[in-house]
Amino acid sequence: MSRLAPMHYRRRILFASGDAPVMIRRASISGSDNPHDHDYFEIQIIEGGHGTHWTIQGHAPLHRGQAFLLRPGAWHAYRDCRGLRVFICGFSQELLGRELQWCQSDPLLGRLLGPAAVGQGAGGIITLQLPSAGLTYCRRQFAEMKKTEGAIARSDQIGLLLLVLGELGRASAQVLQPSATPTHHRAVANVLKALEQSPARPWTLEELASLACLERSYLVRIFKTQAGLPPLAYLRRRRADLAASLLLKTNLPISKVGNDVGWDDPNHFARQFRLHFGLSASAYRARFRTLSR
């Protein structure tokens, strides 16, 4: 019985060049692929066929027109596939921090790429359903994007990516609650940056409010509006996602995993991980590291 080991896909290997803004390909899958995550954002759209999508939240059947937006570090796999056809488009975190930075505060694209997306997407994955016309539209943009891959036309690639993201944003309006305040508050951005850079630090609400130069209750209110969760709940989810990644990628003892993400007390780590994923850290590791054909 063969085993599927978790893999980590790297932008510098899969993209056409080190400066390429996007990667585009079309995959045909029969059977099962390896559980994996990425160090870049990825859009996957199901063109046809059958299979099951495995994620840290469980598994669900796949169907035509289904679209997934995966944040860096989000884990998934396709299982028991029969003629599954998937459009895949990757784009770098650097792109989101430069040319597409404005997308994070855009009323439409902010649902996918802004801080609210972390609170909305389960385990770093946003699942959408495209109508038939939307699927056809995205297929056309992917085909054009493929023509420019590896070429100098960086602006063309980014423009086509924005058209696809716009279509996904319209689909997200049907399933994700819009932010009450589309403006990206600078204080929220500063707190998010601190939490992302130092998730293991024992942050308190008082420290975060001081960092943002805001009163605590006001910080909680605007942070939840834009990130979908209060600051400390966001930190707990981020730590749990990091722990899940370490459980799959490393052989670290479970207590060391908890310590590395900021939960020094093994019992507290166990409670938080089970609360987030519905099973213990040891069961999670055993389940997802021993997927078999």
Image (cartoon, grey):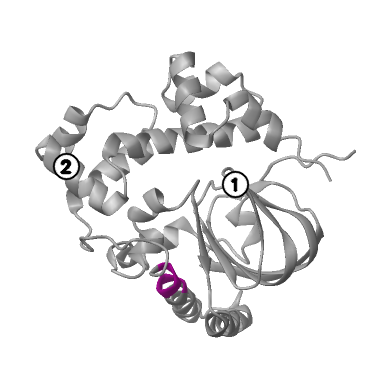
Image spot of residue 26 (x, y percent): 70, 71
Residue 139 at what x, y percent from top left? 60, 81
Q: Name the residue under label 2.
A: 219
Coordinates of residue 267 in the picture (x, y in percent): 47, 15
Vertically, is 121 above or below 63? above
Q: Provide the residue designation for mark 1.
A: 75
Q: Residue at x 57, y 32 (%)?
A: 246
| Classed neighbour count for the residue bearing mark 1: other residues with Cα under 10 Å, few (<14), some (14–19), many (≥20) | many
Q: Which amino acid does label 1 sit on?
A: Trp
Between residues 132 and 123, which one lies in front from this camera angle? 132
**CA neighbours of label 2 inside 10 A, class few (<14), some (14 to 19), many (20+):** many
Residue 182 horizontal side relative to residue 15, left or right? left
Dot 1 or dot 2: first in sequence order is: 1
Residues 139 and 174: in front is 174
What residue is shown at x 20% (from left), y 62% (from top)?
183
The outermost residue toward the right is 1
- Which residue shows up at 66% across the image and 25% down it? 251
Q: Callout 1: helix, strand or loop?
A: loop
215 relative to 18, above or below: above
Q: Can residue 250 be seen in this view?
A: no
Residue at 47%, 22% in the rendered image: 271
Is 129 inside the magenta-drawn segment? no
Q: In which quarter of the image is the N terminus?
A: top right
Judge left or right: residue 136 versus residue 236: right
SS at circle 2: helix
Percent position of residue 84, x then y: 75, 67
In the image, residue 21 sits, relative to residue 269, either above or below, namely below
